[in-house]
Amino acid sequence: MLKVEQSKEVFRVLRAYSRISANSHVQLVVRLNTSVDSSVYNKALSGRVSLVKSPSADVRLLVFATEQEKATFASSFLAQDVVGDVSLVERIIGGQVRLDAFTHCVSTPAMISHVAKLGRTLGPLGLFPTVKGGTVGNALDQLCSALRAGNISLKVNKACILNVTVGSLSFQDTDLVGNVQAILSYIVKHRADAVKGELFSSVYLTSTNTPAVLYSV
């Protein structure tokens, strides 16, 4: 593991070590204080973080809406999105839709009871839509726009480690730094009262075939 003092220097180091592609993803890994269970963090961080730039070059949405809602917000959907009602739910149950192709899942309140049937399918993929996560609502145009702009949710694993993609090596340094700082600031702002001592145990960044580089918080 390497350590550098300047934020932008981190990305210069990652690019120097990367031998794959300029589009290789950059991962932010945050080790949080283990004085509390990971569920405490996940409850505190249940909202969405607004990033400077979307970390996904190709945002693909899986949208559950009635036929009327689909027609009303037709201009909000792109060619790579899949939009449907109960029939889409049934297609997913039947294994006819490749879910790993989607970056986000959105639902209107009218459809959420039907989407609930997919809890065990969408949940493990981090795709199940929720109100707190900003992926359930009537204003599909606003929801879709926010997700394309870079609004993400955070999930801490059982070891109290957060692993999230903040962009790719082809991004401008200012965008990468902005995304990292937005996430860290969100974690600090929503710190759980039960956490004792320092919030961050360590913060580092890594990419494909690169060492982990410590990030100065």
Image: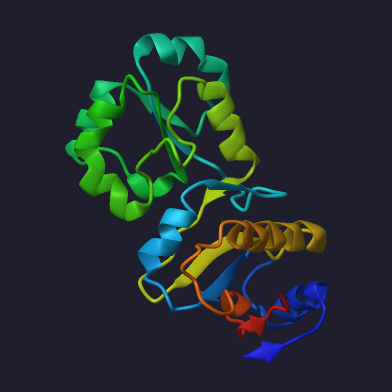
Place residue 170 in its image quadrant: bottom right
Place residue 7 in its image quadrant: bottom right
179 over 133 or under it: above or below: below
Q: Quadrant of the C terminus?
A: bottom right
At x 45% / y 40%, what residue is drawn?
A: 132
Which x, y percent locates residue 106?
A: 43, 33
130 over 173 or under it: above or below: above
Q: Is residue 163 left or right of residue 85?
A: right
The scheme the figure's colours follow is rainbow
At x 67% / y 50%, what residue is drawn?
A: 51
Which x, y percent locates residue 45?
A: 49, 55
Please, which residue is most extreme toward the left here? 94
Q: Is residue 53 left or right of residue 120?
A: right
Place residue 21 in its image quadrant: bottom right
Which sits in the foreground, 191 or 177? Answer: 191
113 over 197 or under it: above or below: above
Which sits in the foreground, 196 or 14? Answer: 196
Which sits in the foreground, 17 or 2? Answer: 2
Count of labels in the image: 0
At x 80% / y 63%, what residue is drawn?
A: 173
Q: Is residue 127 left or right of residue 217?
A: left
Which x, y percent locates residue 177?
A: 75, 63
Which x, y percent locates residue 24?
A: 61, 66
Q: Quadrant of the N terminus?
A: bottom right
At x 38% / y 45%, what residue is drawn?
A: 127
